[in-house]
Structures are given as structure tokens and as C-alpha cells.
């Protein structure tokens, strides 16, 4: 590869690292209900970390029929340059004490008495969570999305990656709910124009079939 | 060229800004591309009703009373509320468990609990979609240079007063073109009498000694 092309690749990666931090800043300063801090944002910008996350997302896809689409999410996340995961640290342990009834328990005292769902493999989030608190995640995510748009960066929002990160234990202990924003600094957004059966047929598998399999045969015949 | 006076410029600009905020909320990111939110803008006399209702909740919720009192002040200069609401039942089939039920079908079949603030149980992703729309509206307001704050108390009140219909959840984005940002550092509402009346009642531990005795 030409030197200038290698330089471009290095600079692109640097841009991802910078942009991920700026997006984190916008997500952190977005509104919080009642002005109480509760969201943390974690950046995964190492390819190996993102691959670990994708493997966990794929494992979860086999657990339930309604989670089959996680495989497609994993295929998209593999093409992401960085993944930002926003957590809600109070929704599980510390209801807002505002008796809003969004959870359907009428008052917060009843929510505190209610048993949570057991952490079974087919339960992504051990509800019932305090929905009023968890709404902060919506603000954090939209803060990040809004910054990504300002910076002209492609983004995708995934709940599969949030749930998988919770399962991997890489988020704070009190996390009750988590969502992920994946960003990509590439010429074509990997999160848009996704064909059907994307988990099976994507650039990676296509390369494997078309080039990686054909080339050794070509070489052995024509050598 | 016709001459347009400043008050007209400001009020027309505010009305146009609320429309742009509604467009931003309408086109915001949402899970599963489910655009089910409902929106309504309220200004003028209808705000008085919300303010009175909020203020009347004083005994139950000092927060609502504070926001009601604040709204009375807010109405003295051009302002507007954008209500954003949504239904509570899940149409995602994510079966994620965040609502406390294992499957969306179980949650949708559960008995509805009605209250003045919201009807539950509600789908977490419905809430997330609705609040992302609210934040997108707030983000647009910020870019347009308006003063802006998101209020759940005023949203709950509008829902209770049936100002927005056919929804179970509601949040509101309030914008203003006041000369000073009216949403933060609202110290002018705390007269000394009012402070003395409320503070000891709401925060008794603050003036209490370490072992619980009240310091005179």
C-alpha cells in the first residue's frame, strides 16, 4: 500500500478516537430527569473489544426466536469503528420516588417490594426497572446521536449490544439498562442499506467466498 | 419592504421554532422505526390551566407546585409547550424483560393501572422512543437559540387535564424567548417566607443534629 494511503488509514482511526470522546461529551451533558446524575458512557474503540461484544451478541441471538435479529446487529457492529454504551445506574436499584406509575406499580414503594425477574439467559434486563429513571438513557442516546449528526458521522443505535455488554460484566455493577451507539467513519455507512440475510451475506462472508476461497485455487492451478 | 415590529418578530419566530422542533421530534431516531408519538403545542391561556393544576398538587408534590409557580412567571413572556405522548403497550416483540414481564405479550395482557401521572405498565422502548423525540426537539431548540427545558411534571398535568388525547405517557418540552433564561437558577420564586415554610417541612434532617434532636 502507498505510504499516503497508510497515513489516511492512521488518521481515520485517530478521527474515530477523537469523535468517540466528543460524542461521549454530548451524551454526558444531555438532560437528566430531576437533575440527578445516573448515566455513564463507556467507549469501546479497540477492534478486539468490539469483536468480543459481537460474539456475545451472537450468542444471545440463539437464545430466543425474537432475538434472531441480533445476528444481523452483530454483523453491523463488526464494521463499526467504535461502540459507545450508555448505562442507567439507578433504574434497577433506586426508583425515582416520584410515583409516576409508568411501571404500572402505582407508587415507588410497591415497585421496591416487587420481585425482580431472575437473571435467566432469556431475560435481557431484570425488570421491573424504574422507567422514569431509565428515560435518562433516551436523553443520553439522543445527545450522542445529535453530536454524531453534527460531526457528520454515521451512527446506529442497538439495544442488543447494550444487553450483551451487561452480560459480559464490562459495565458498572448497578447497571439496570444499557443501550449502545455504534459509530463509523467510513465512506459508506455500515448501518444503512442492509440487505436481507445480512448475517449470512455481508462484505466479510462475500470476501471469504469470492476471494479467500478462489485465490488459493487460482494460485495452485496457475503456479 | 413592510416593517415588522420586534414583538411580532419574536412571537412569529417562536411559533415557527416550535414547528421546527416538532419536525425534529417527528424525524428523530427511534427503535424499530415505529413513529407512533403524538404531539401538540400549547401556549397562551391554556397554560394557565396547567399552572393551576400543578400548583394544586402542592401537598402531594412540592416539585409539581414549584413548576406550576414557575409556569405562571414563564407565561408573562412569550413561551410555548410542546407535548409529546405515546401509548404504553409494546409493538416491538423484543421480549427484553425491562418492564418486569418476560414477554411483550404478557405485558400487553397485564391489567392496566391508571393514575393521574401515567398509565402503566409501559414498554421501556416506547418510553425511550418518546423521550428521544423530546430530546431531539430540545436539541433543535438549543440550535435555534431558544431557552428550553424538558418537564415531566407539566407533561403529567397536561395528560391529566386531557390536553393530549389517546396517549398513556406524556412529556413536555418547554421553550421561551424571555430576556433572561427563565429555566435555571429560579431563586426569585423563593421569598423568605416561602422558604421558611417549605424548607423545614420538606428537609427536616437538614436542621437536625447528629443524634436526631432538633436544634433550636
Image (tube, rainbow, N blue to C red):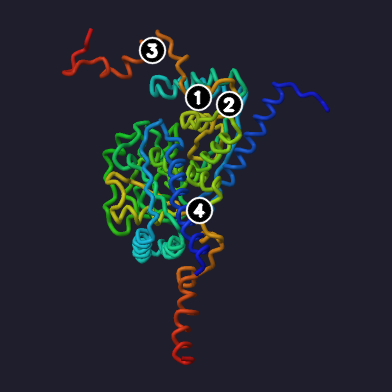
Q: Earlier in the sequence, mark 2 or mark 1?
A: 2
Pinpoint residue B25: horizontal percent, then vertical percent.
57, 42
The chain containing the residue under callout 2 comes to B
Residue under the point 39% across and 60% down: A47
Q: Earlier in the sequence, mark 2 or mark 3?
A: 2
Q: Nearer the viewer, residue A80 or B78?
A: A80
Give the label on residue B195, or none: 3
Residues tagged by mark 4 and mark 1 found on one chain of the structure: no
Q: Nearer the viewer, residue A109 or B213?
A: B213
- State the SS at label 2: strand
Does the CB distance between marks 4 and 3 fall below 8 Å? no
Q: Which residue is mark 2?
A: B176
Residue under the point 45% across and 79% down: A212
Residues tagged by mark 2 and mark 1 found on one chain of the structure: yes
Pinpoint residue B181: horizontal percent, then vertical percent.
53, 23
Q: What whole-number distance in Å separates the C-alpha atoms at marks 4 and 2?
A: 31 Å
Q: Nearer the viewer, residue B171 or A193?
A: A193
Q: Which residue is mark 1?
A: B183
Does the CB distance between marks 2 and 1 fall below 8 Å? yes
Q: Which residue is mark 4?
A: A155
Q: What whole-number distance in Å separates the C-alpha atoms at marks 3 and 1?
A: 19 Å
- State the SS at label 4: strand
Amino acid at each position: 500500500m502507498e505510504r499516503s494511503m497508510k497515513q489516511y488509514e492512521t488518521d481515520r482511526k485517530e478521527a474515530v478516537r477523537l469523535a468517540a470522546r466528543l460524542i461521549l461529551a454530548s451524551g454526558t451533558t444531555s438532560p437528566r430527569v430531576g437533575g440527578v446524575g445516573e448515566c455513564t458512557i463507556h467507549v469501546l474503540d479497540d477492534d478486539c473489544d468490539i469483536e468480543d461484544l459481537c460474539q456475545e451478541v451472537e450468542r444471545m441471538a440463539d437464545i430466543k426466536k425474537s432475538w434472531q435479529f441480533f445476528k444481523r446487529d452483530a454483523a453491523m457492529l463488526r464494521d463499526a469503528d467504535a461502540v459507545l454504551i450508555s448505562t442507567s445506574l439507578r433504574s434497577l436499584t433506586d426508583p425515582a420516588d416520584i410515583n409516576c406509575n409508568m411501571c404500572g406499580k402505582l407508587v415507588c414503594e410497591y415497585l421496591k417490594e416487587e420481585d425482580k425477574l431472575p437473571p435467566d439467559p432469556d431475560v435481557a434486563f431484570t425488570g421491573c426497572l424504574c422507567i422514569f429513571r431509565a428515560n435518562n438513557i433516551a436523553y443520553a442516546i439522543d445527545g450522542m446521536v445529535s453530536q454524531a449528526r453534527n460531526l457528520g458521522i454515521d451512527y446506529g443505535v442497538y439495544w442488543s449490544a447494550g444487553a450483551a455488554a451487561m452480560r459480559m460484566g464490562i459495565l458498572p455493577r448497578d447497571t439496570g439498562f444499557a443501550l449502545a451507539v455504534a459509530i463509523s467513519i467510513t465512506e459508506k455507512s455500515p448501518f444503512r442499506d442492509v440487505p436481507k440475510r445480512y448475517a449470512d451475506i455481508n462484505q466479510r462472508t462475500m470476501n471469504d467466498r469470492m476471494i479467500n476461497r478462489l485465490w488459493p485455487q487460482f494460485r495452485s492451478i496457475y503456479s | 419592504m413592510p416593517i415588522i415590529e420586534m414583538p411580532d418578530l419574536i412571537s412569529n419566530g417562536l411559533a415557527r421554532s416550535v414547528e421546527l422542533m416538532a419536525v425534529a421530534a417527528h424525524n428523530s431516531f427511534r427503535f424499530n422505526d415505529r413513529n407512533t408519538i403524538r404531539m401538540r403545542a400549547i401556549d397562551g391561556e391554556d397554560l394557565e390551566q396547567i399552572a393551576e393544576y400543578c400548583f394544586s398538587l402542592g401537598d402531594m408534590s412540592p416539585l409539581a407546585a414549584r413548576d406550576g409557580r414557575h409556569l405562571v412567571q414563564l407565561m408573562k413572556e412569550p413561551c410555548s409547550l410542546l407535548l409529546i405522548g405515546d401509548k404504553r403497550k409494546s409493538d416491538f416483540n423484543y421480549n427484553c424483560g425491562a418492564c418486569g414481564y418476560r414477554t411483550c405479550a404478557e405485558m400487553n395482557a397485564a391489567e392496566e393501572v391508571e393514575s393521574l401521572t401515567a398509565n402503566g405498565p409501559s414498554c421501556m422502548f416506547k418510553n425511550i422512543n418518546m423521550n428521544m423525540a423530546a430530546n431531539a426537539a430540545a436539541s433543535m431548540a438549543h440550535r435555534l437559540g431558544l431557552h428550553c427545558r424538558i418537564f415531566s411534571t407539566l407533561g403529567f398535568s397536561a395528560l391529566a387535564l386531557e390536553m393530549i388525547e389517546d396517549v398513556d405517557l406524556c412529556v413536555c418540552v418547554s421553550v421561551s424567548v424571555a430576556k433572561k433564561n427563565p429555566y435555571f437558577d429560579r431563586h426569585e420564586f423563593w421569598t423568605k417566607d416561602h422558604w421558611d415554610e417549605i424548607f423545614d417541612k420538606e428537609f427536616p434532617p437538614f436542621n437536625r443534629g447528629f443524634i436526631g434532636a432538633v436544634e433550636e
